[in-house]
Image (cartoon, rainbow, N blue to C red):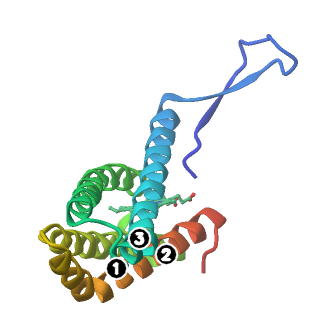
Amino acid sequence: MFAKYRIDTSSTDGIYGAVVQPSAMSVIDSVMQVVHVLFAGLWTGSVLFVVGAVLPASTAGTISPDAMTAISNRLSWLTRISALVFVATGGHLAGTGYTVGSLFGTGRGQLVVAMLVLWFVLTGLVEVGSKRLRGASTVADLEAAIASTRSLWLAAGGVAVVLLVDAGLLAAGVTW
Ligand code: HEM
């Protein structure tokens, strides 16, 4: 959809003669897409790692409140930087690939709208969850903070998985 190529008929080098080169426009689109997918993997992967590995380990008393504060801070910053990246790159991809009509009127567009909503929900869950974990200064505080945010983090993990499924459906070209 975004690949806009031009045929370089002036080139006679190599075994192919004419070389297919991306135009300036498609380079920008490609950079946007690569950065978008890079942060998609980084962010959802980090959320799932915290939910699946860090929190269970911490429940068993193996992670100190200081370490948890550092991890929560990092996740929170990654969430904020990712938000800027998703709005810029996702906005670019949506703006160049879709119209308002196709966003709401096609299956692919609806997957993009769902992606936007899921990103918003996951950002909120991670921000609230991280803030509560950062506040703990003793092991007892941390246990209480983890217990009180358990369902929130489970929801965050679920939303991260649904986001990845949504992206997978887009990548697979599934539509209706
Ligand atoms: C502001 C939030 C976001 C917006 C506006 C947005 C928008 C878009 C758009 C327009 C596309 C291109 C769809 C197409 O090729 O037709 C896309 C692709 C993609 N998005 Fe997002 N997105 C957002 C957040 C996210 C998040 C949080 C993830 C995390 C999993 C994500 C993962 C992906 C992936 C992996 C693709 C590539 C799918 C493919 O290969 O076709 N996006 N996004």
Tag of residue 161: 2
Identified at 53% across, 77% down, the residue is 107
Judge whether 156 appears above or below 80 on screen: below
Judge whether 160 appears above or below 21 on screen: below
Query: Dividing the image into 4 quarters, which one contains the C terminus?
Result: bottom right
* Residue 104 seen in render: no
Label 1 and label 3: CA atoms lie apart by 31 Å
Q: Are marks 2 and 3 in contact (CB under 8 Å)?
A: no
Q: Nearer the viewer, residue 126 or 53?
A: 53
* Residue 57 seen in render: yes
Residue type at mark 2?
Val
Check disc 1 and report the residue beneath it: 59
Residue type at mark 3?
Met
Tag of residue 115: 3
Q: Which numbered disc, 1 or 2, marks the residue that appears first in the sequence?
A: 1
Q: Which numbered disc, 1 or 3, marks the residue that appears first in the sequence?
A: 1
Label 1 and label 2: CA atoms lie apart by 23 Å
Percent position (x, y) of residue 145? 20, 81
Identified at 45% across, 70% down, the residue is 53
Q: Residue furthest right?
A: 15
Identified at 23% across, 56% down, the residue is 70
Percent position (x, y) of residue 172? 65, 66
What kind of element bears circle 1?
helix
Q: Is the residue marked 1 within 8 Å of ligand 1, measured from its CB? A: no
Q: How many neighbours does mark 3 have within 10 angstroms: few (below 14), some (14-19), or many (20 or more)?
A: some
Residue type at mark 1?
Thr
Label 2 and label 3: CA atoms lie apart by 12 Å
Judge whether 20 appears above or below 79 on screen: above
What kind of element bears circle 3?
helix
Quarter holding residue 21: top right
Percent position (x, y) of residue 127? 21, 69
